[in-house]
Image (cartoon, rainbow, N blue to C red):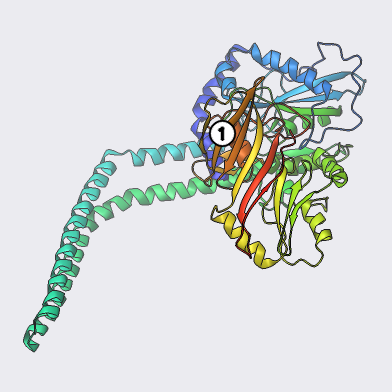
């Protein structure tokens, strides 16, 4: 991963260098030690806006009014930047942090994730935690060395003599394969003729022995021909090896240097927290499953913002991050929409940086506690299975904490049941029908029906926008977003097949009511297929992961299930009226 990350860095090294030199000639950017150039006063009045009692939970929050005000000012600033317009249009994550200075002054900081306009330092925004692009730094020096290795590799790969040898070797190998293939066909035909003679004729011992010798001779001839072709190919292959050996050694050196450079870089990211404690990225990720920091760790907006607040001894009050520009091809990001911090890159970092701050409780935790007051209606029950109508806001399974869930409720209701109980899941904010198996055997048979697509499912959803076609089918492969779980992304390389049929039920007031018929059961399948531009391009109302508009709930309901009883074989149909 580190090698790939540095490869991407090295690909645009010269472009970023030229951009830096151009900016250096045009203007000299200074960074006063008091932080005055990055601390922005609010242009609009903040009178009447109550300061937050606790700091934002970066992974589950609603933007505080002060953050919305600050984000609005940053967005106005971005809209005026003509030099970055093309890059901004492609999309980038920005963040704001509202702080109070030691003198009691209220203001906000702004940051962008990664780089912008070929640099990680721009006026108006906070500087990086560690400036790996600064002239004369060890990173740029070693980056240049690795760039030189890349140039040597490209020179060897594009060398005329090397390419000529490759073409000759490929042509000779093709001739060899064709000649040997013809011999195999002749041997196969001869074998068939021998078999026919043995079956239709009465052979003398001499004739039978002759057939055996013929078979042995043909096999020996094939071996001799195979060896001869190998002998003809060897000189070309040996000549090619002179090039490929050099290339492989250079690639091995590049990989070694890249890995060493990446680790050295991680050590230079010295991350602070509210207590004044400092740890590097390697320390922060040592106890994580991956143990090594992912590429780009420490370069997101949130760590940059908090680092500057701590360096200047400003008190962080609230924080928010928003997307600006077009949605990426894989992820679903909407222009101007607020998003939580990414978990894989930022969770270990922010866990450290927030120590010493009182932080808001996650909304998901509060919702799970509220779920304890929700009822769980039982639609059907016999000695083998149970069907319940899960309310929106209740978990299917408890997760890391022992929160209220369908599984916990069913364990209380069915103390004698064995097996996993839960046959399939619904998202916490999705309501509707769920199957519960009372025995291991029933659970196994019901899961088989899901795996073979023998269970019919119908969901009702209310979408933001107007769906053009009356009905259709969506095929977009899904995979977990590598640095932002539980989000899913459309990924044609590593994604799993996800298929959804749909039909429009009603269009009214800018919303579309649809029926979804999922043929596969991927995580967040309906939510992504609804929101993605290659799907319906209309997110489900209330979907805060993939949508635009907050609502009192996620407008998605599992309305109907059709299945075969796991024991009696009876055809069953269950329905639960849509609550919206």
Q: Tag 1's secondary structure?
A: strand
* Residue 444 locus on image (x, y percent): 63, 63
The answer to whether 44 is drawn above or below residue 244 in the figure is above
Q: Would residue 398 be seen by someone viewing this image from the given angle?
A: no
Left or right of 149? Residue 434 is right
* Residue 458 locus on image (x, y percent): 62, 42
The C terminus - image quarter: top right
**Residue at horizontal 61%, vertical 22%?**
325
* Residue 194 locus on image (x, y percent): 13, 75
Residue 39 quadrant: top right
**Residue at horizontal 19%, vertical 55%?**
178
Q: Which residue is mark 1?
A: 503
Q: Would residue 154 be seen by someone viewing this image from the given angle?
A: yes
View extreme (front): residue: 570
View extreme (bottom): residue: 205
* Residue 520 locus on image (x, y percent): 56, 47
**Residue at horizontal 28%, vertical 43%?**
162
Q: Nearer the viewer, residue 134 or 240?
A: 240
Q: How many marks?
A: 1
Left or right of 526? Residue 221 is left
Q: Nearer the viewer, residue 562 or 360?
A: 562
The answer to whether 157 is drawn above or below residue 450 in the figure is above
The answer to whether 289 is drawn above or below residue 10 in the figure is below
Q: Nearer the viewer, residue 382 or 432?
A: 382
């Amino acid at each position: 991963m580190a090698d790939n990350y540095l490869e991407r860095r090295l690909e645009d090294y010269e472009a970023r260098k030229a951009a830096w030199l151009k900016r250096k000639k045009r203007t000299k950017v200074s960074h006063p030690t008091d932080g005055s150039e990055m601390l922005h006063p609010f242009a609009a009045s903040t009178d009447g806006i109550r300061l937050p009692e606790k700091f934002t939970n970066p992974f589950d929050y609603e933007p505080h009014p002060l953050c919305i005000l600050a984000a609005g000012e940053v967005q106005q600033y971005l809209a005026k930047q003509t030099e970055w317009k093309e890059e901004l249009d492609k999309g980038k994550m920005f963040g704001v942090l509202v702080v109070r200075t030691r003198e009691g002054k209220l203001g906000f900081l702004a940051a962008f994730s990664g780089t912008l306009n070929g640099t990680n330092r721009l006026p108006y925004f906070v500087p990086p935690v560690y400036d790996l692009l600064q002239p004369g730094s060890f990173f740029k020096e070693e980056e240049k060395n690795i760039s030189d290795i890349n140039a040597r590799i490209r020179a060897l790969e594009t060398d005329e003599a090397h390419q000529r040898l490759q073409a000759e070797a490929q042509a000779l190998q093709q001739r060899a394969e064709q000649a040997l293939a013809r011999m195999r066909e002749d041997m196969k035909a001869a074998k068939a003729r021998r078999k026919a003679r043995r079956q239709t004729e009465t052979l003398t011992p001499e004739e039978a022995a002759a057939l055996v010798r013929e078979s042995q001779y043909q096999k020996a001839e094939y071996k001799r021909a195979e060896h001869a072709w190998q002998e003809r190919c060897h000189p070309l292959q040996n000549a090619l090896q002179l090039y490929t050996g050099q290339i492989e050694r250079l690639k091995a050196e590049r990989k070694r240097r890249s890995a060493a450079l990446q680790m050295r870089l991680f050590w230079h990211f010295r991350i602070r927290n509210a207590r004044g404690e400092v740890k590097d990225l390697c320390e922060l990720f040592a106890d994580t499953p991956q143990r090594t920091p992912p590429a780009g760790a420490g370069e997101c907006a949130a760590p940059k913002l908090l680092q500057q607040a701590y360096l200047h001894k400003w008190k962080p009050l609230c924080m928010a991050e928003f997307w600006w520009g077009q949605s990426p091809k894989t992820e679903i990001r909407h222009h101007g929409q607020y998003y939580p911090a990414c978990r894989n890159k930022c969770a270990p970092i922010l866990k450290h940086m927030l120590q010493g701050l009182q932080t808001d409780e996650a909304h998901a935790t509060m919702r799970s506690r509220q779920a304890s007051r929700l009822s769980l209606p039982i639609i059907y029950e016999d000695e083998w299975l149970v069907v319940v109508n899960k309310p929106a806001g209740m978990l299917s399974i408890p997760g890391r904490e022992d929160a209220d869930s369908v599984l916990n409720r069913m364990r209380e209701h069915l103390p004698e049941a064995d097996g996993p109980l839960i046959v399939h899941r619904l998202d916490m904010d999705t309501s509707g029908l769920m199957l519960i198996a009372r025995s291991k055997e029933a659970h196994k048979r019901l899961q088989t029906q899901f795996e073979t697509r023998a269970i019919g499912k119908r969901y009702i959803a209310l979408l933001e926008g107007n769906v053009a076609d009356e009905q259709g089918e969506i095929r977009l492969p899904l995979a977990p977003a590598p640095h932002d779980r539980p989000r899913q992304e459309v990924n044609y390389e590593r994604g799993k097949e996800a298929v959804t049929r749909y039909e429009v039920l009603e269009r009214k007031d800018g919303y579309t009511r649809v029926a979804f018929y999922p043929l596969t059961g991927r995580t967040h399948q309906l939510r992504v297929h609804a929101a993605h531009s290659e799907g319906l391009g209309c997110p489900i109302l209330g979907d805060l992961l993939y949508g635009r508009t907050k609502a009192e709930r996620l407008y998605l309901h599992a309305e109907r299930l059709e299945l075969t009883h796991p024991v009696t074989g009876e055809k069953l149909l269950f329905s639960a009226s849509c609550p919206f």
